[in-house]
Image (cartoon, coloured by chain):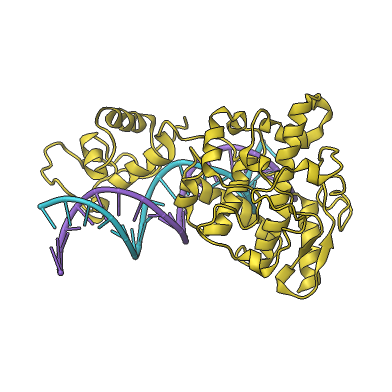
Chain colours: A yellow, B cyan, C purple
DNA sequence: AATGACGGCAACCGCGTCTCC
DNA sequence: CGGAGACGCGGTTGCCGTCAT
């Protein structure tokens, strides 16, 4: 656990046990002599111990009773985002990335709501992931993260690609091929091993003959995007991802969740962009957010421990290619 | 080796909502 | 019903490690 000197440490005086002020507002607390900044091991220990004995809640009084010179808010945040035993540390996995993209497309910046569907992840972590990873790429593409272009890119290119990589990793693990021959991509994705990937397993492959409606303009860009040709689709090595040599996506990807065998199901027609909030089928049709499926699978999910899969989804070639597309359609 | 730029992440802040008296 | 305090959420800040020059 990281130990840092607390900012502003050294001040003291607040929180004597003789205080008879039973309730303090956040504002009042802010005026008192409270510690701020990074938490020390000792503070963490106090907080963990107190919650273990008394439970959580009533954070302001908890902070005082535990002998912490912190606001209740600070204690709550520290507990929820860091100290809780079920908090998962480590890189955001491919499946988690996919879920985040999917759920964000549905709910927007409802971080806590999104976090509810990623066991062990906090809203803060997801928010940070979004801001540091996803928004970074939007910036590289010189488009707004909320723009239709960027959303379409996520939906029609990056999310399929994520699924592809999850599947590729699964195929890789199933075939028990030596990872030494797989190159960096497989090494990064090998953590998907041994998952009965509920979402990827349910994924329908939505990327054949995608008509990418960049910017809502009339010009469509048709990309025959398949695992085997992904390195040559639309521009050479535009995706730069090694994939398993599967010849037919309809075999590669299993039955769509809605049992719609139509390979054109995923045409990004306007009527598919909108979708019912109550629908359990994602607007993209990638998987059954069988959020419960995800959770059920997760305990055996060795992927969850890591694997450096966090940022391999995007690369320079992607950015270059997409920028060309954007420029062509502006 | 020094240093400045940048990215990631923990923590803070403000505000809206909820709960209780 | 209204007010005060607690809670939770989303946005923002600032520290620190890493990388580039």
Q: Which residue is drawn at 25% across and 56% down?
A: A27
Of the 4 image quadrants, the one containing the C terminus of chain A is bottom right
Q: Which residue is drawn at 87% across and 57% down?
A: A235
For residue A263, side relative to residue A33 (left or right): right
Residue A222 sits in quarter: bottom right
Q: Position of residue A7 (x, y in %)?
A: 39, 43
Look at the image and tell me whether residue A313 can be seen.
no
Residue A201 sits in quarter: top right
For residue C18, side relative to residue C15 (left or right): right
Q: Is residue A141 above or below residue A309?
A: below
Say which of A30 and A82 sits in front.
Answer: A82
Say which of A274 and A135 sits in front.
Answer: A274
Q: Residue at x 64, y 48 (%)?
A: A257
Q: Where is residue A309 in the image (x, y as percent from the top left)?
A: 67, 39
Say which of A192 and A132 sits in front.
Answer: A192
Q: Position of residue A170 (x, y in %)?
A: 72, 33
State the count of labels.
0
Q: In this view, does A172 lie above or below A280?
A: above
Q: In this view, does A218 lie above or below A190?
A: below
Residue B5 sits in quarter: bottom right
Look at the image and tell me whether residue A172 can be seen.
yes
For residue A257, side relative to residue A209 (left or right): left
Say which of A175 and A140 sits in front.
Answer: A175
């Amino acid at each position: 656990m990281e130990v840092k000197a607390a900012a502003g440490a050294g001040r003291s005086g607040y929180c004597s046990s003789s205080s008879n002020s039973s309730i303090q507002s956040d504002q009042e607390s802010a005026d008192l002599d409270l510690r701020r900044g990074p938490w020390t091991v000792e503070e963490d220990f106090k907080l963990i111990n107190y919650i273990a004995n008394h439970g959580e809640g009533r954070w302001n009084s908890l902070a005082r009773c535990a002998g912490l010179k912190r606001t209740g808010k600070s204690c709550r945040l520290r507990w929820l985002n860091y100290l809780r035993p079920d908090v998962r540390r480590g890189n955001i996995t491919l499946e988690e990335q996919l879920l985040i993209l999917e759920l964000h497309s549905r709910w927007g910046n409802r971080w806590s709501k999104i976090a509810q569907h990623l066991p062990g992840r906090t809203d803060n972590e997801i928010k940070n992931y979004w801001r540091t990873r996803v928004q970074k790429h939007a910036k590289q593409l010189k488009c707004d993260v909320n723009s239709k272009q960027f959303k379409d890119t996520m939906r029609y290119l990056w999310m399929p690609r994520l699924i592809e990589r999850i599947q590729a990793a699964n195929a890789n693990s199933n075939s028990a091929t030596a990872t030494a021959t797989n190159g960096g991509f497989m090494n990064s994705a090998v953590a998907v091993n041994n998952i009965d990937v509920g979402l990827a397993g349910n994924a329908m492959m939505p990327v054949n003959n995608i008509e990418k409606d960049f910017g809502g303009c009339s010009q469509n860009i048709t990309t025959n995007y398949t695992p085997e040709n992904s390195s040559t689709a639309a521009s050479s090595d535009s995706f730069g991802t090694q994939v398993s040599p599967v010849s037919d996506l309809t075999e590669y990807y299993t039955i769509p969740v809605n049992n719609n065998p139509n390979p054109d199901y995923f045409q990004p027609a306007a009527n598919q962009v909108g979708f019912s909030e109550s629908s359990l089928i994602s607007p993209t049709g990638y998987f059954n957010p069988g959020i419960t499926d995800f959770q059920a699978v997760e305990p055996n999910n060795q992927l969850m421990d890591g694997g450096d899969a966090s940022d391999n989804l995007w690369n320079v070639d992607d950015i270059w290619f997409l920028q060309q597309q954007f420029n062509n359609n502006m």
